[in-house]
Amino acid sequence: QVQLVESGGGLVQAGDSLRLSCVASGRTFSRYLMGWFRQAPGKEREFVVGISRTGGRTSYEDSVKGRFTISRDNAKNTVILQINSLKPEDTAVYYCAAGQKLAITSYDYDYEYWGQGTQVTVSS
């Protein structure tokens, strides 16, 4: 079992930055592929970025490349999503997820554990 708790969301203006954190419980954090997803009002949940177990590989959804950066610290059971140059279309609830696949996957059904989400609202 893994419990995930996100933090760091908020109301910001376009062009601002945010740093989202996800802290995992348990001793086996390094065994999990980690991902961030987001769900905007009235839309399906979508993959944003994933990071491999060691942090050596990452995969970004095209619309966030160059603005979002994911990292993880396995010693601290933490994954970070640094978001720069925020746009109104980034407004969504952001979810941290953990899965046991070996390769990064963008399918939400490949992630077994989910956090409660943190709201990011970007005003224009």
Image (cartoon, rainbow, N blue to C red):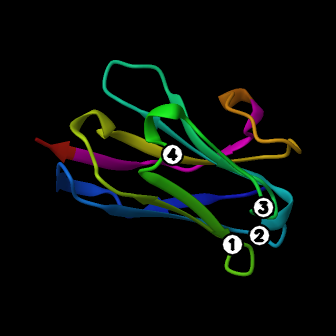
Say few, some or many: other residues with alpha carbon within 10 Å of mark 4 (under 14 / 14 to 19 / 20 or more): many
Q: Residues within 10 Å of mark 3 (few under 14, many from 20)?
A: few
Residue 56 numbered mark, or none: 3
User: How far apart are labels 2 and 4 at the CA level?
Assistant: 19 Å
Q: Earlier in the sequence, mark 1 or mark 4?
A: 1
Q: Earlier in the sequence, mark 2 or mark 4?
A: 2
Identify the residue at horizontal 25%, vertical 42% (top origin).
87
Distance between the alpha carbons at the discs numbered 1 and 4: 16 Å
* Residue 93 shown left or right of residue 25 in the figure: left
Q: Amino acid at mark 1?
A: Asn
Residue 113 at what x, y percent from top left?
A: 69, 46
Dot 2: element? loop
Circle 2 is placed at which residue position? 26
Task: Point out residue 16 in the picture as x, y percentages from the top left corner.
Answer: 22, 58
Q: Are marks 3 and 2 in contact (CB under 8 Å)?
A: no
Magenta range: 110-121
The mark that comes first in sequence, 3 or 1, is 3
Q: Nearer the viewer, residue 58 or 1?
A: 58
Q: Secondary structure at mark 3?
A: loop
- Spatial CA distance of label 3 from label 1 is 16 Å
Q: Under tag 1, what secondary structure?
A: loop
Which disc, if any, is residue 97? none
**Residue tagged 4:** 95
Label 1 near label 2: C-beta < 8 Å?
yes
Mark nearer the viewer, 2 or 4: 4
Q: Residue at x 44, y 33 (%)?
A: 63
**Which amino acid type is marked by label 3?**
Gly
Residue designated by label 1: 77
Dot 2 and dot 4 residues touching (CB under 8 Å): no
Q: Is residue 62 above or below residue 72?
A: above
Magenta segment: does it hold 114? yes
- Mark 4 or 3, which is nearer the eye? 3
